[in-house]
Image: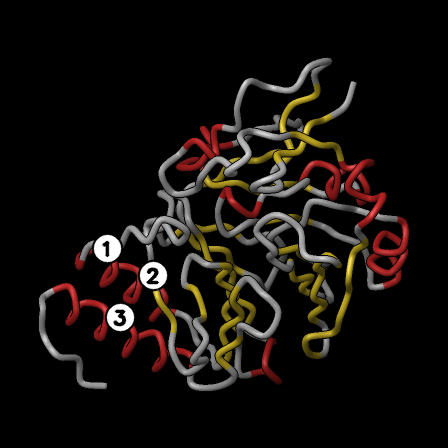
C-alpha cells in the first residue's frame, strides 16, 4: 500500500489503500488546502519528474532541496559532525542519487525538524539510513505517519554530542531550532527553518503564526522566541530555503527584528 503525500504541503501520511479524506496539516489555519481541493500523490510519482538537489552550504553542511521546487519548497540541511550526522528538516523525496551522496557524507544518525510543515517524507529518510526521528512532545498530534523510529522529547535534546535542538514555540507549540556550535567556521550557526524565518532583506528575520495566511504572533511570544535563543552562541542563521541565510551577526539580527516586530504590534515607529 502506498504512503500518500499531500500535494500542497508535501507531508507523507500513513500507508492505506485509499488516501485520507483530508490532510490535517493543511486543514489547520497555519496552512491551507490547495485551490483545486485536496490532492494526493506518492513518492514514486513525485520521482517521475522531480529530483533531489544537493549543494554544499559550507564545510560540513549539505543543503538538500528538490528540483523543480515541490510543495512548500523548503530545503533540508545535513549537519556533519564527528559524532554522526543530523538531518534538519525534510523534503518530499529520497532518490537514489541523494541516498548515495548522503551515504558518502556519512549517513544520518538522527532527523529533527523545525515544525510539522517540514516533516516531508521523514520516515522514508529515516528508513533509508536507519536513523532516529526526534519530534517534540508538544507536536506529537501532528505526526501523520507513525513509526517506531520516532522518539519524543520535551524542551531540549542532543541528537548527537555537540548539537542541540531546542523547542522555542511560536509558529507551533513544538517549533524548534538547531544550534551547531562548529558552524560558520567555529563561530556557530543556528538552523531555524521558518520557526524564525530569514526574510528577503537578509539582515533581518521575522516570526509568524501563519505565513501563507499572514496571521501574526503576539508580543509576548515574539519576545519569548528572541530570549530563548540568546543562550546560544552563533554568528550565522540558516532559514528554510536556498539563500535565506543571515551571514553574520545573527543574534543582533534576531534581537532587532523582534524589537521591530513588537514596535509595529504596539503601533510605534521602529528604531530601524
Please report contact status of discs 3 and 1: CB closer than 8 Å, yes or no: no
Please tell me whether mark 1 sits on a helix, a strand or a loop: helix
- Residue 266 is left or right of residue 5, and the answer is left
- The residue indicated by pointer 1 is 221
In the displayed orientation, state which residue is furthest to the top: 17
Distance of mark 1 from mark 2, alpha carbons? 9 Å
Q: Nearer the viewer, mark 1 or mark 2?
A: 2
Task: Indicate the position of residue 21 as horizontal and vertical percent values.
Answer: 55, 18
- Residue 127 is left or right of residue 191, and the answer is right
Dot 2, crowdedness within 10 Å: few (<14), some or many (≥20)? many
In the displayed orientation, state which residue is furthest to the left: 267
Task: Indicate the position of residue 245 as horizontal and vertical percent values.
Answer: 53, 76
Q: Residue at x 72, y 78 (%)?
A: 59
Q: For residue 207, which numbered disc appears in the image?
A: 2
Relative to 113, residue 199 above or below:
below
Q: Residue at x 27, y 79 (%)?
A: 256
- The residue indicated by pointer 3 is 258
Please report contact status of discs 1 and 2: CB closer than 8 Å, yes or no: yes
Q: Pick whichever, 40 or 127, lies toward us.
A: 40
- Residue 217 is left or right of residue 121, and the answer is left
Q: Quadrant of the C terminus?
A: bottom left
Q: Residue at x 39, y 37 (%)?
A: 138
Amino acid at each position: 500500500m502506498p504512503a500518500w503525500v499531500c500535494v500542497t504541503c508535501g507531508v507523507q501520511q500513513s500507508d492505506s489503500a485509499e488516501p485520507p479524506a483530508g490532510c490535517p496539516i493543511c486543514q489547520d489555519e497555519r496552512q491551507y488546502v490547495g485551490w483545486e481541493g485536496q490532492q494526493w500523490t506518492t513518492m514514486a510519482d513525485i520521482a517521475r519528474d522531480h529530483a533531489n538537489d544537493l549543494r554544499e552550504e559550507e564545510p560540513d553542511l549539505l543543503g538538500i532541496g528538490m528540483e523543480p521546487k515541490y510543495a512548500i519548497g523548503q530545503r533540508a540541511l545535513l549537519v556533519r559532525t564527528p559524532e554522526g550526522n543530523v538531518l534538519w528538516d525534510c523534503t518530499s523525496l529520497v532518490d537514489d542519487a541523494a541516498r548515495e551522496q548522503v551515504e558518502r557524507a556519512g549517513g544520518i544518525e538522527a532527523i529533527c525538524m523545525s515544525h510539522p510543515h517540514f516533516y516531508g517524507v521523514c520516515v522514508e529518510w529515516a528508513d533509508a539510513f536507519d536513523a532516529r526521528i526526534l519530534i517534540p512532545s508538544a507536536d506529537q498530534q501532528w505526526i501523520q505517519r507513525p513509526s517506531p523510529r520516532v522518539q519524543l522529547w520535551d524542551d531540549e535534546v542532543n541528537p548527537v554530542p555537540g548539537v542541540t535542538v531546542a523547542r522555542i514555540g511560536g509558529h507551533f507549540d513544538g517549533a524548534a531550532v538547531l544550534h551547531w556550535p562548529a558552524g560558520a567556521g567555529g563561530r556557530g550557526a543556528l538552523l531555524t527553518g521558518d520557526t524564525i524565518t530569514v526574510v528577503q532583506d537578509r539582515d533581518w528575520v521575522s516570526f509568524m503564526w501563519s505565513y501563507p495566511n499572514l496571521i501574526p504572533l503576539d508580543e509576548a511570544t515574539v519576545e519569548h522566541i528572541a530570549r530563548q535563543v540568546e543562550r546560544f552562541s552563533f554568528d550565522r542563521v540558516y532559514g528554510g530555503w536556498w539563500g535565506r541565510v543571515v551571514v553574520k551577526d545573527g543574534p543582533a539580527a534576531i534581537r532587532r527584528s523582534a524589537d521591530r516586530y513588537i514596535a509595529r504590534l504596539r503601533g510605534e515607529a521602529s528604531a530601524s
